[in-house]
Image (cartoon, rainbow, N blue to C red):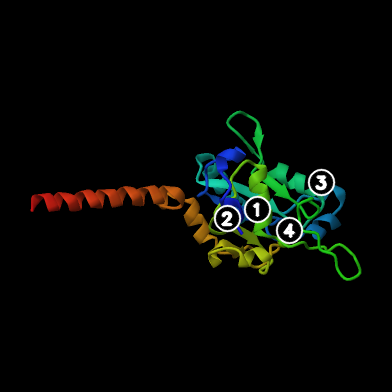
């Protein structure tokens, strides 16, 4: 699906040149926080979301990598439509930046009722409760934040408790679709294996673009050594 964007010049659109960094797309309910309806059943003063701390830690790591440029974007793509609740979660996750202002973790949030989400109507004309989650939604968010939506099928890491969103078939590598196991309710520990993504984020261990540069350098070095050998002969 990226091919339709690839022929447009980035410069003409005034977008950034970064077409390599990782893009993290996270679901909200039963992924990042416990069940929404469970939370809403509590009395008003106890409606604090239960966070999946394992995933929150990963997102904080991703945010750090975002500051350094190894991650291009962190998005929230949810089929929840309660914008007050979503903003509450967003505020609770915000971190105090170096300038003293609070910085949200998410670069952009797309909820169920966002105007760009696909509208599905069932046979009786009722709007579908669960619009698909597509690479096209990620492309929209990328353009919104001024990033070029190239190579998305290779760059997006999608995290959701539902194993069969449309985007699953659009991603290059099965490792890029991470299913929260078991779906997070706050009752049980999240047993998801985030290792492949964590390794990508940990650029000291050779993830992300750092690794690419290192490989290029070592290749160059190898070529030099080879040519030196040739000279000696
Ligand atoms: Mg969910």
What element does badge 4 sit on? Answer: loop
The quadrant in which the N terminus is found is: bottom right
Q: Indicate the secondary structure of the residue bearing disc 1.
A: helix
- Alpha-carbon span between mark 1 and mark 2: 8 Å
* Residue at disc 4, CB closer than 8 Å to ligand 1: yes
**Which x, y percent locates residue 32?**
68, 55
Q: Residues within 10 Å of mark 2 (few under 14, many from 20)?
A: many
Q: What residue occupies the far front of the structure in this picture? A: 7
Marks 3/2: CA distance? 30 Å
Residue with the mark numbered 2:
152
Could you tell which of marks 3 and 2 lies nearer the N-terminus?
A: 3
Residue assigned mark 1: 138
Q: CA distance from mark 3 to mark 1?
A: 22 Å
Q: Kindly identify which residue carries mark 4.
A: 29
Q: Which residue is mark 3?
A: 84
- Badge 4 or badge 2: first in the primary sequence: 4
Mark nearest the camera among 3 and 2 is 2
**Structural distance between the alpha carbons of marks 4 and 2:** 24 Å
Q: Where does the image place residue 105, in percent across and percent down from the top left?
A: 64, 44
Instruction: State the count of labels.
Output: 4
Pick out the residue farthest to the bottom: 123
* Residue located at (41% from left, 52% from top): 205
Q: Are marks 1 and 2 in contact (CB under 8 Å)?
A: yes
* Quarter of the rendered image showing ligand 1: bottom right
Do the residues under discs 3 and 1 have CB atoms within 8 angstroms?
no
Whichever of callouts 4 and 3 sits on the residue coming sooner in the sequence is 4
Q: Is residue 111 visible?
A: yes
Rendered position, 175 above or below 113: below
Q: Position of residue 57 (x, y in %)?
A: 58, 50
Earlier sequence position, callout 4 versus callout 1: 4
* Mark pair 4, 3: CA separation: 14 Å
């Amino acid at each position: 699906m990226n091919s339709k964007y690839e022929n447009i010049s980035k410069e003409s659109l005034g977008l950034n040149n970064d077409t390599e960094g990782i893009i993290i797309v996270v679901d909200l309910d039963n992924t990042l926080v416990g069940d929404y309806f469970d939370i809403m059943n509590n009395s008003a003063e106890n409606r604090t979301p239960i966070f999946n701390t394992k995933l929150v830690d990963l997102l904080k790591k991703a945010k750090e990598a975002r500051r350094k440029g190894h991650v291009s974007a962190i998005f929230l793509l949810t089929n929840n439509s309660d914008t007050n609740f979503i903003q509450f979660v967003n505020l609770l996750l915000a971190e105090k930046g170096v300038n003293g202002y609070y910085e949200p973790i998410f670069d952009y949030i797309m909820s169920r009722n966002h105007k760009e989400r696909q509208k599905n109507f069932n046979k009786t004309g009722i709007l579908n409760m669960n619009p698909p989650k597509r690479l096209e939604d990620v492309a929209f968010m990328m353009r919104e934040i001024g990033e070029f939506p190239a190579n998305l099928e290779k760059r997006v890491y999608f995290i959701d408790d539902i194993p069969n969103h449309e985007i699953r078939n659009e991603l290059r590598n099965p490792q890029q679709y991470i299913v929260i196991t078991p779906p997070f309710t706050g009752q049980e520990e999240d047993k998801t294996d985030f290792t492949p993504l964590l390794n990508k984020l940990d650029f000291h261990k050779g993830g992300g673009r750092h690794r690419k540069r290192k490989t290029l350098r070592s290749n160059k070095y190898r070529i030099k050594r080879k040519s030196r050998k040739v000279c000696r002969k």
